[in-house]
Image: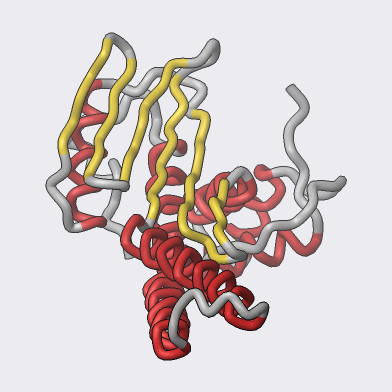
């Protein structure tokens, strides 16, 4: 397989993220000819950035490029990040990942296994480990159920308001204008409530998932629970 090369813009993004830490979300940029990861790590050494930090920043960029967003009325109500490990996830790594998930998302959640399929869920928040031909694939995702429900109800209320208003204008006198005004106000409030609850949520969840996926993708196969470098704390 041809080794990936990074563009000048991607190189700048990777070094910025490596220097500032994993909490800096890299931008999505189109792939093109450029430097390889080994080249970037060599440059990083010259300016005092560790190869591990460069590799993690590059992996985070790749995870984010494969991200999925669920939208409703132009608002992001769900996010998902995927990472192919190209190896099998050990039981110890899965258990440590569950511990990290509980710490990062501040939720106990529950785990289930079906043969080689494993999952951790907490409401609309989920992490799935799925087998592929070359190893395991992780899918980390979340849906903001409360905000989505508020936006949907608001949309229905505004739709009913529009129909009643049109009926009244056509002389049907389906309902009083006070009722129409109440539905209009209620629908608007529900939409605003949902939009406000989503503000910053997708960015936060995406960054948390990118960090976790990048950390796990870069773990060596020989990692054990006693390894201090295994799944370091999120920043």
Residue in the picture at 73% in, 32% down: 3
62 up-or-down from 219: above or below:
below
Report the number of numbered marks: 0
Where is residue 114 drawn, in percent x and y? 26, 13
41 up-or-down from 2: above or below:
below
The picture quadrant where one finds residue 104 is bottom left
Where is residue 196 drawn, in percent x and y? 41, 79
Left/right placement of residue 14 relative to residue 157 reads: right
Left/right placement of residue 137 relative to residue 229 reads: right
Image quarter hosting the C terminus: bottom left
Report the residue that reaches farthest toward the right. Answer: 33
* Residue situated in front as seen by the camera: 192 or 53: 192
The picture quadrant where one finds residue 234 is bottom left
* Residue situated in front as seen by the camera: 33 or 157: 157
- Residue 199 seen in the current view: no
Residue in the picture at 32% in, 41% down: 126
Left/right placement of residue 13 relative to residue 132 reads: right
72 up-or-down from 34: above or below:
below
């Amino acid at each position: 397989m041809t080794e990936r090369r990074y563009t000048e813009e991607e190189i700048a993004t990777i070094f910025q993220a490596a220097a500032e830490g994993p909490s800096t979300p890299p931008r999505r940029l189109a792939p093109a000819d450029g430097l390889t990861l080994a080249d970037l790590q060599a440059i990083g050494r010259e300016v005092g950035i560790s190869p591990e930090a460069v590799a993690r920043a590059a992996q985070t960029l790749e995870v984010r490029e494969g991200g999925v967003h669920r939208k409703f009325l132009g608002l992001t109500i769900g996010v998902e990040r995927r990472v192919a490990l190209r190896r099998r996830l050990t039981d110890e790594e899965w258990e440590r990942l569950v511990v990290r998930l509980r710490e990062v998302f501040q939720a106990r959640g529950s785990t289930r296994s079906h043969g080689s399929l494993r999952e951790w869920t907490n409401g609309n928040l989920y992490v799935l480990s799925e087998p592929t031909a070359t190893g395991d694939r992780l899918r980390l995702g979340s849906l903001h159920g409360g905000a989505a429900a508020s936006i949907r109800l608001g949309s229905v209320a505004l739709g009913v308001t529009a129909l009643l208003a049109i009926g009244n204008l056509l002389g049907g006198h389906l309902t009083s204008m006070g009722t129409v005004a109440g539905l209009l106000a209620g629908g608007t409030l529900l939409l605003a409530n949902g939009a406000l609850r989503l503000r910053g949520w997708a960015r936060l969840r995406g960054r948390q998932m990118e960090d976790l996926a990048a950390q796990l993708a870069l773990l060596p196969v020989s990692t054990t629970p006693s390894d201090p470098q295994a799944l370091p704390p999120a920043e």
